[in-house]
Image (cartoon, rainbow, N blue to C red):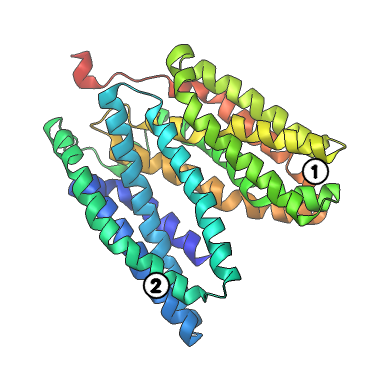
Amino acid sequence: MWLSAGAVSGLPIAGILVQRLGASRGIATGVAAVAVGLLLLAFGLGSSSWVAAAIALYIIGLGMGLWEVSMNVTGAHIASLLESDGLLPRLHAALSVGTVVGALLGALLASASVPLSGQCVAVACLLFPASILIGRTVRSVDAAKSGGGIRAPGRDLWASWRERRTLLLGLFVFGFAFTEGTANEWIAYVLVDGYGADESTGALAFAVFVTAMTIGRIAGGALIARFGRISTLRVSLAVALVGVLVVALAESTVLALAGALLWGLGAALGFPVGMSAAADDPYRAAARVSVVSSIGYAAFLGGPPLLGLLGGRISIQQAILLVCAALLISFLTTGATRRMIPVEKRN
């Protein structure tokens, strides 16, 4: 709860900070905040202080929110300079790989009886120099943005919340984020609870989903370059829909695993392409990415608990059919991802 609260409060203000300080400082500040939070969490765990642990989780979430927006703004700007819609999905593929590597490393350390507090300290010690290195690396991108007028006067975060296209992009990302977040939290449980599979098969289903998503993000750029954003995304939505339906309605574990594969492939491109579309105009990228991220992460954070409550009344296997409604939202708002020509290029 505290981690989610920090992320939710960090995402909306991140756009303002990135506009005023630059993405390099936003990244460095976000990474440093996560490191400080991890050190405080280690103290809370060691002293059994729930207050310290709660504050630590809030700081970690806050830092992750700032880090998230700053990285997406930077990645989208580089993609714009390279005129490549495939760059941001590939960067998000690295996120998927990092999630799996982190989970495996955590499991390995736990099996070696390394205390969680020690793991927090070790990661924090790695993040402090990383924040400096990443900040310096991204500084040249900030310089390019400043030359292009990234800090447009009179245009702030609150103005972006009133833009129709930005809000539609937020809804588009909301649907994909709900789809991805549901699989992250529940797909393994569906295999175990709904199909009677053992826990290793449930873990396999999650691995299949993440692997498919990673492959989809790596390969998706070429598809977007050839067929365009909208056509590629609509096919992705159809693939994700089929995957969800197979997982929810299939009668065998093998088919459910195949559904997990399709679910991952279909869900791969929505979030990164939505971020890229929000940053089409570098003058407004920071604020718009902040708005779209905030709406999208509301689905990441709120979707899984909602399905858990629904699954308490019916089976979780039936509850995941709610993802179909989320995919419909994304389908209806796909047109918002159409590339926008920045004002200065029109002139």
Residue 310 is at least partly visible in this image: no
Relative to 144, 122 lies left or right? right
Instruction: Write the residue at 30% across / 43% down.
Output: 157
Q: Which dot marks residue 318?
A: 1
- Residue 252 in percent (x, y) is at 86, 38
Circles 2 and 1 in contact, beta carbons < 8 Å: no
- Residue 318 in percent (x, y) is at 80, 43
Q: Nearer the viewer, residue 335 or 112?
A: 112
Which amino acid does the dot numbered 2 rest on?
Val
Residue at the left extreme of this rendering: 147
Instruction: Write the residue at 49% across / 59% down.
Output: 4
Location of mark 2 (residue): 121
Which amino acid does the dot numbered 1 rest on?
Gln
- Residue 196 in percent (x, y) is at 86, 51
Q: Which dot marks residue 347?
A: none
Answer with mark 2 or mark 1, whichever residue precedes in sequence.
2
